[in-house]
Image (spheres, helix red, strand yellow):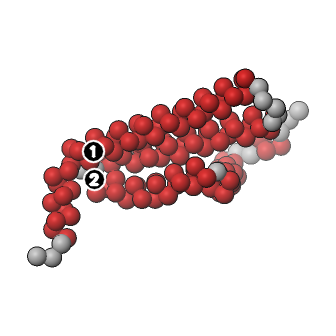
């Protein structure tokens, strides 16, 4: 059986792929409370990455660790949706698949926390000085 959508090439394929990606982000935001929470965390932390990080590498690590959480959450949601599509019946393999996805999200959150904690600890004196300079004497 051939898929008629696989015949697209060039800009038409990119346009459709972008549309599907946007639909996926909207569906995840509407249907997954964890994704909504992590999205708001991303909205808060991404601009801060440019203040906390001093080099482009540091900024990329800070921003990348936050975006990784969203990526892993999307993959976890995809696994959960697929398992639920197959059956709502309790099964050991279904539980394992969902638990693996949940564990991946946890590890991405831990990594994000470690990256941010390390950066904040290393830059704390500079950041505190920046904040103090904002307070009128």
- Residue 31 x %, y %: 68, 53
Residue 83: x and y, percent?
A: 75, 34
Instruction: Tell me which residue sits at (37%, 59%) in the image.
Output: 47
Q: Is residue 44 rendered to the left or right of residue 100?
A: left
For the C terminus, the image quarter is bottom left
The residue that appears at 42% across and 44% down in the rendered structure is 64
Q: Secondary structure at mark 1?
A: helix
Contact between labelled residues 2 and 1, with CB atoms less than 8 Å apart: yes
User: Secondary structure under badge 2?
Assistant: helix
What label sits on residue 119 in the rendered view?
1
Q: Is residue 106 visible?
A: yes
Q: How many marks?
A: 2
Q: x%, y% of residue 36?
A: 57, 55
Residue at the front extreme, as displayed: 90
**Crowding at mark 2 (Cα within 10 Å: few <14, some 14-19, many 20+):** many
Q: Considering only vertical position in the picture, is 90 above or below 57?
A: above
Rendered residue at 50%/58% (across/down): 40
Q: Hey, which residue is sitting farthest top in the picture? A: 92
Please provide percent x and percent y for residue 131.
21, 64
Q: Which residue is mark 2?
A: 52
How many neighbours does mark 1 have within 10 angstroms: few (below 14), some (14-19), or many (20 or more)?
Answer: some
Horizontal relation, residue 11 to residue 126: left or right: right
């Amino acid at each position: 059986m051939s898929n008629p959508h696989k015949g697209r090439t060039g800009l038409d394929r990119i346009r459709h792929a972008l549309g599907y990606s946007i639909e996926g982000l909207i569906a995840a935001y509407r249907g997954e409370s964890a994704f909504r929470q992590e999205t708001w965390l991303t909205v808060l932390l991404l601009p801060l990455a440019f203040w906390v990080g001093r080099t482009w590498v540091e900024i990329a690590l800070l921003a990348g660790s936050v975006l990784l959480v969203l990526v892993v959450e999307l993959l976890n949601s995809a696994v959960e949706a697929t398992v639920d599509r197959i059956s709502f019946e309790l099964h050991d393999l279904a539980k394992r698949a969902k638990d693996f996805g949940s564990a991946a999200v946890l590890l991405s959150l831990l990594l994000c926390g470690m990256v941010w904690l390390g950066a904040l600890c290393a830059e704390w004196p500079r950041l505190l000085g920046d904040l103090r300079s904002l307070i009128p004497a």
